[in-house]
Amino acid sequence: MKNYQTLLFDIDDTLLDFGAAENLALRMLFEEQKMVLTDEMKAQYITINQGLWRAFEEGEISRDEVLNTRFSLLFLEYGQEVDGKLLGEKYSSYLAEGHQLIDGALELITELHTKFDLYIVTNGDSKTQYKRIHDSGLYPLFKGIFVSEDTGFQKPMKEFFDYVFAQIPQFSREQTLIIGDSLSADIKGGQLAGIDTCWINPKQKTNDTSSIVPTYQIQKLVELYRILNVEKKPITINH
Ligand SMILES: [Mg+2]
């Protein structure tokens, strides 16, 4: 059993349910455009958005390009020319309202924060992420929050992790674990940075890469208690 001291948590689809926040924000955005969001449009949006974020993770385009073009590209599919930047900003403000916790996340983090040094490492928009982290009740349980926008780099870039490690007092690579749902951002990033990794894979997706190998793979957050050798206590959370 390894003795970890520092835990780096991803936020979206690791501790907060991004799908739920995204659904709500998209519905509100489409409503405002006097359109009804269909499942097909949602699927189309996901394809466009994922493609842009992947290009961003690989350093091909900037974060602003992702945020400012995803809606112009989407609405173009339906023959509409829209102001991508304006819609992107509206969407971000709606997205910031969504902070639904993943099952067991608050209980887990509440338990872990007394035993480990907890940090958040997330790609995304700083204002949006801070608001969601605050509103979810997670904020006071973390020693620090690192949002890609503030660091100038993003996961999986080694520079992002160098920045994070430099800010953590008495940092030790050997005693650090990153926990996240993205193979290409969290696990690849951790691997490049030389720390252990835990891939949360609730839908049991196949790892079709040969180069990204997580140290641990789990389906649910609750499995972390065992990996971290922490007893799961019945606790009361005041919502
Ligand atoms: Mg994630």
Image (tube, rainbow, N blue to C red):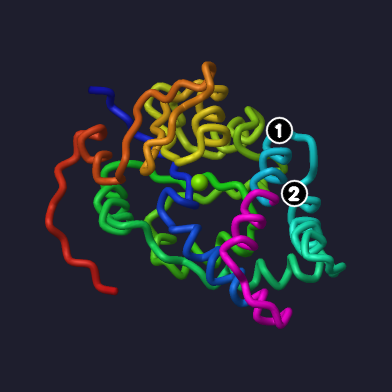
From the viewer's perspective, is 136 left or right of 50?
left
Q: Compared with residue 11, is residue 228 higher up or lower down, i.e. above or below?
A: above
**Percent of width and height locating residue 11:** 48, 51
Closer-to-camera residue (226/61)? 61
Q: Compared with residue 129, is residue 188 higher up or lower down, i.e. above or below?
A: above
**Percent of width and height locating residue 107:** 26, 57
- The residue drawn where x is 75% and y is 49% is 63
Closer-to-camera residue (136/74)? 74
Closer-to-camera residue (18/170)? 18
Marks 2/1: CA distance?
11 Å
- The residue drawn where x is 64% and y is 46% is 50
Closer-to-camera residue (190/213)? 213
From the viewer's perspective, is 52 left or right of 39?
right
Q: Compared with residue 173, is residue 94 higher up or lower down, i.e. above or below?
A: below
In the picture, residue 17 is in which quadrant? bottom left
Which residue, given by chain and number where applicable, does mark 2 sit on? 63
- The residue drawn where x is 44% and y is 29% is 206
**Percent of width and height locating residue 44:** 66, 55
Q: Compared with residue 14, is residue 71 higher up or lower down, i.e. above or below?
A: below
From the viewer's perspective, is 238 left or right of 204?
left
**Percent of width and height locating residue 188:** 54, 27
Q: Amino acid at mark 2?
A: Arg
Q: Is residue 229 magenta?
A: no
The N terminus: image quadrant: top left
Q: Main secondary structure of the magenta part?
A: helix
Which residue, given by chain and number where applicable, does mark 1 sit on? 58
Q: Residues within 10 Å of mark 2 (few under 14, many from 20)?
A: many
Q: Which label number is shown at residue 172?
A: none
Q: Amino acid at mark 1?
A: Glu
Q: Tell me which label, 2 or 1, sits earlier in the chain.
A: 1
Magenta highlight range = 29-48
Q: Residues within 10 Å of mark 1 (few under 14, many from 20)?
A: some
